[in-house]
Image (cartoon, helix red, strand yellow):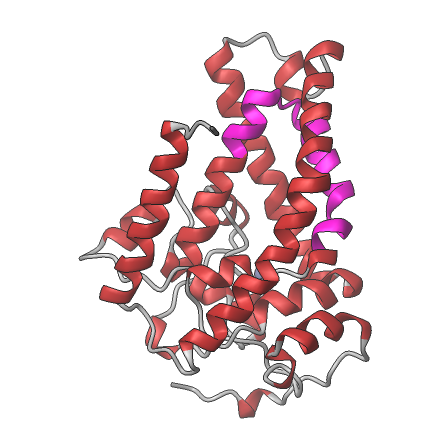
Amino acid sequence: MARISPLGIVGVALIGGLWLAERARQLRTQTHDTATRQVRNVAMGAGAMLVVTAIEMPLLKRLAKGNVRARRGLAQTLPLPRAAKTVLGVAAMDYAFYWWHIATHKVPLLWRLHRVHHIDPDMDMTTALRFHALDMVVSLPFRVAQVVLSGADPVNLMAHRRFFDASVLFHHSNLRLPGHWDETLSLFLTTPEMHGVHHSKVPEEMDSNWSSGLSLWDRLHGTLRSKPQEAIEIGVADRASIADLSLTNSLLAPFREMPEALPPGSISSR
Ligand SMILES: [Zn+2]
C-alpha cells in the first residue's frame, strides 16, 4: 500500500482550506460561470502536470544531483552552512523566475503560450493550473538553466518547488484576506491583490508585479503596482480572448494568428 507522507496531508489540507476560504471571502466579483471555468482550468492543468511529472521533474532532479557531484552553481560554490545554501538556492531560483515571467510576456513566441493563462476572465485557485502543456515543454531550457546556475541540490529543488506551487495557488486565489493582511504579507510574498494587478487587461498594469514567490524582486526593480481590486478588469484586451476560452481553442490558440489588441478605450474603467 502506498504511504501517505505527512507533508502530503498538510498540502491537501492547505489546498482544501484555501478552496473553501476563497468561496467564503471573495476578493473580486466573478464575471463568468465559475464551474465551467474551473473544469477547463483543471483540464488544462492536467496536461501541463503530465509534462512536469513525466519530463521536467525527473530531468531537474538528475541535474540537482549533478550540481552536488560537480560542485557547480551559485549555492554549491559559496562556502556557506547548509541552511544558508538552501535559502540562497531557493531565492536564486525565485529571482530567475521573475525574469522568465517577464520573458513570457515580451518574447512573442512565449506570449502566445502564456496568453492562454492570462485570458481567464476571472481569477481563483484554478487559474494557477491554466497553462498550456507546450508552455511547460518550451520552458524546459529555462528550468535547466535555473537549476544549474543556482546550484540547487535535490533538497533545494524540492523546497523551491513546494514554495513555488504553494505561492502560485495562493496568489491566484480569489481570497480576501482579513484587515491589512494582504498589504502586510506583500512586504515579503506575492499576494492575491498584488497578482490581481498583473492579470489586469490594462497593459501598463499587466507589465507590473512579475514576482511569483518573494515580492522583493518587484520592489528591487520598481515594478510593484497596487490598485483596488474592484477597479481591475481581469483578462487580456484582444479580440479573441473570450472566444479562446474553450478547452479546444485554448489548446489551438498559440498556433493561430495572434488577435488584434483592443483599443485602450474599450477596457471599462471601473
Ligand atoms: Zn503573466
Task: Compare residues 57 and 153 and report the one nearer the observer.
Answer: 57
Residue 187 to residue 81: above or below = below
Residue lying at 72% horizontally and 85% vertically, measured from the top left: 260
Choose top left, top right, bottom left or bottom right for residue 122: bottom left
What are the residue bounds of the magenta stretch? 135-160
* Relative vertical location of residue 158 with respect to residue 191 in this rendering, above or below: above
Residue 44 drawn at (x, y percent): 61, 63
Say which residue appears at 59% left-offset and 47% top-offset.
Answer: 98
Q: Residue at x 46, y 37 (%)?
A: 163
Task: Work out which residue is located at the far front of the displayed protein and give it.
Answer: 1
At x 59% / y 7%, what residue is drawn?
79
Q: Nearer the viewer, residue 235 or 78?
A: 235
Q: Quadrant of the C terminus?
A: bottom left
Q: Is residue 192 left or right of residue 107?
A: left
The quarter of the picture showing ligand 1: bottom right
Please state the horizontal and vertical placement of residue 69, each as a whole percent of the image.
73, 10
Magenta-colored segment: predominant secondary structure: helix
Residue 54, percent from left and from top: 70, 41
Where is residue 56? Give x, y as percent: 70, 39
Using the rendered view, name the quadrant where residue 242 is placed. bottom right
124 in the magenta segment: no
Eyeballing the image, is 182 above or below 162? below
Q: Is residue 187 visible to the viewer in this orientation of the structure? A: no
